[in-house]
Image: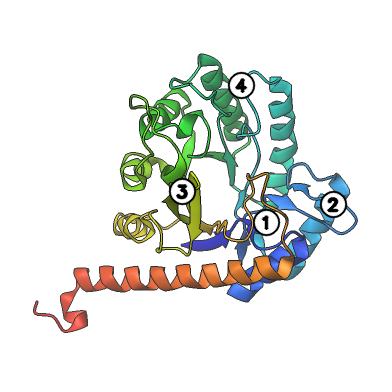
């Protein structure tokens, strides 16, 4: 099992992201927004070539690998009616960068739905399938996140997307169901259930994003929590994953200091971000340790002194 984290949750700069990873003693990073000295912050597949080269040198010098690209490909900032050339250009930039770093996985999405949409347009399937095939043909694995996108509208929509886009896999985000409406049900759409969503996509999941949150009706939004302290069923989902033999990566995305997709969330300084990120990672490690111990005891009761 690999522990990693979405880099721009730990720091704005590549140096800060590396430092946060090293403080945790982890060996992998999941870059998304990256600020490299002398260059503006941008997604890892969009920063200029010189900035990318410098980031790679810094990662290699620190002995930090890149497990997954946290791309913006087809994410919530794009609609399916936008020119597809924009998406294709991102894919074409990402592929050689992933190959250079030896990175197998890249997070993708499936465009932002309209406010009243409850079905997936055929054009979404076509575009996601084309993008999936481009990565697969390059020997790379795209993973779709249950975010604010067509594939994330419910677990039923997720399975439909996976069925129509052979070879696509899933990255499950534990907190997204808490604030995403379940568009498979009649209006007014209720919020999704994290456990229910997980049960239906777990066999397709090769990556997990851990964040936790509690829905706050007073502000009609989520409050973000430490892992295991919200409504994301983090403990239960990880326990189920491990019990079923999950041994891939788990990536932290705290959202407690900055929220990537929130226009009202102001950029924070690297020290505050790093401190939160490191504490979040340590709390996740503690949860994982408790789960592993519990599962070991269940498999061998004598370990805990229980009657056989």
Disc 2 or 4, which lies upstream in sequence?
2
Between the residue at mark 2 and the residue at mark 3, the CA separation in whole angstroms equals 43 Å
Q: Name the secondary structure under disc 2.
A: helix
Q: Secondary structure at mark 4?
A: loop
Front position among marks 2 and 4: 4
Q: Nearer the viewer, mark 3 or mark 4?
A: 3
Distance Cα–Cα, label 2 vs label 1:
16 Å
- In the picture of the structure, the residue carrying the numbered disc 3 is 218
Q: In this view, which residue lies farthest toward the top?
A: 122
What residue would you read off at disc 2? 51
Q: Say which mark, if any, is on residue 80.
A: 4
* Nearer-N-terminus badge (3/1): 1
Q: Residue at x 34, y 73 (%)?
A: 290
Label 2 – label 4 distance at C-alpha? 30 Å
Looking at the rendered image, the disc whose residue lies closer to the viewer, 2 or 3, is: 3
The answer to which of 189 and 21 lies nearer the viewer is: 189
| Closest to the observer, 70 or 186 | 186
Q: Is residue 106 above or below residue 151?
A: below
* Crowd around label 1: few <14 · some 14–19 · many ≥20 (10 Å): many
Q: Earlier in the sequence, mark 2 or mark 1?
A: 1
Give the CA separation, mark 3 to mark 1.
29 Å
Q: Quadrant of residue 85?
A: top right
Q: Which residue is mark 1?
A: 8
Give the secondary structure at mark 3: loop
């Amino acid at each position: 099992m690999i522990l990693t984290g979405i880099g721009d949750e730990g720091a704005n700069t590549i140096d800060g992201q590396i430092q946060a990873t090293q403080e945790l003693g982890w060996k992998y990073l999941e870059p998304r927004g990256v600020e490299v000295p002398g260059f503006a912050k941008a997604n890892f597949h969009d920063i200029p070539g010189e900035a990318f080269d410098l980031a790679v040198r810094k990662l290699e010098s620190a002995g930090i690998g890149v497990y997954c690209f946290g791309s913006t490909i087809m994410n919530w900032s794009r609609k399916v009616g936008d020119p597809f050339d924009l998406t294709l250009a991102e894919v074409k930039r990402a592929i050689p960068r992933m190959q250079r770093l030896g990175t197998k996985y890249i997070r993708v999405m499936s465009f932002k739905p309209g406010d009243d949409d409850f079905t997936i347009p055929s054009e979404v399937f076509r575009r996601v399938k084309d993008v999936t095939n481009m990565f697969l043909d390059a020997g790379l694995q795209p993973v779709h996140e249950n975010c604010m996108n067509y594939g994330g509208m419910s677990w039923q929509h997720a399975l439909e997307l996976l069925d129509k886009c052979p070879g696509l896999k899933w990255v499950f985000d534990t907190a997204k169901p808490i604030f995403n409406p379940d568009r498979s049900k009649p209006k007014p759409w209720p919020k999704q259930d994290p456990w229910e969503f997980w049960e239906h996509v777990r066999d397709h999941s090769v990556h997990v994003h851990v964040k936790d949150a509690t829905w706050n009706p007073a502000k009609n939004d989520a409050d973000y929590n430490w892992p295991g302290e919200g409504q994301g069923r983090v403990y239960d989902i990880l326990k189920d994953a491990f019990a079923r033999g999950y041994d891939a990566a788990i990536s932290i995305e705290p959202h407690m200091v900055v929220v990537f997709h929130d226009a009202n969330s102001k950029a924070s300084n690297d020290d505050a971000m790093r401190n939160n990120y490191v504490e979040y990672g340590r709390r996740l490690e503690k949860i994982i340790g408790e789960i592993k111990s519990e599962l070991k005891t269940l498999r061998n009761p004598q370990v805990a002194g229980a009657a056989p």
